[in-house]
Amino acid sequence: MNIDFKDVGAVVVARITDKRIDAAAGPELKAKVGARLEQGAQRLVLDLSDVEFVDSTGLGAILSIVKRVPAGGSVVLCGCRPTLVDLMRLTRLDRVFKMFPSQAEATAALTA
C-alpha cells in the first residue's frame, strides 16, 4: 500500500496511490494511517483520486480509521471516482463521510 502523506497546516493529507483498497491492502492502510493518528494528527483528508476499486474490506479499513480519530478530530474524503461515490451512497456511508471533489476543497473544509 503506497500512501503519500503531506501536512497542510494542521491537516494531514493521505493520498492513496494504489488502484485498489481490498483485503490485501486494507490492513496496511489502517496501520499506516493509524500511525499518523497516533503521532497526533486530528484532521485527516483521505485522497482517493487514484483508487479505482474498493471492496468491503477496504470500506472496513476506511471506517476503522474514522474510529481511531481522536475526539474533536475529523476525516473527509476527496477525489472519489463515480463508482466509489455510488458505493458510498449504496452503503449509506455518504452520511458518515463528507466527500469533496478536490484535495484543496477538502483541506479548506477542515481548516475553516
Image (cartoon, rainbow, N blue to C red):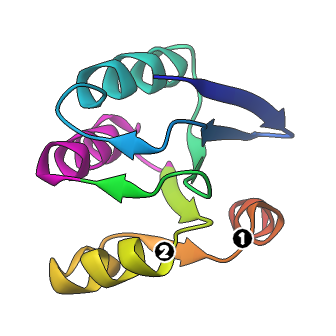
Q: Residue at x 76, y 59 (%)?
A: 107
Is 99 magenta? The answer is no
Name which residue type carries label 2.
Lys
Would you say the magenta stretch is mainly helix, strand or loop? helix
Where residue 38 appears, as percent x and y from the top left, is 46, 16
Q: CA distance from mark 1 to mark 2?
A: 10 Å
Please provide the residue range marked out in magenta: 55-73
Residue beneath disc 1: 109
Q: Percent position (x, y) of residue 96?
A: 30, 71
Mark positioned earlier in the residue sequence (1 or 2) = 2
Instruction: Name which residue type carries label 1.
Output: Ala
- Image quadrant for the N terminus? top left
Towards the viewer: 72 or 14: 14
Does residue 52 sit above or below 83 in this rendering? above
Element at label 1: helix
User: Tag 2's secondary structure?
Assistant: strand
**Which quadrant would residue 89 be assigned to in this image?**
bottom left
Query: On screen, 86 above or below 111?
Result: below
Q: Position of residue 101 (x, y in %)?
A: 67, 77
Left or right: 25 with respect to 40?
A: left
In this figure, which residue is indicated by the disc labeled 2?
Answer: 98
Verify whether residue 68 appears in magenta. Answer: yes
Tell me: 30 left or right of 35.
left
The number of callouts visible is 2
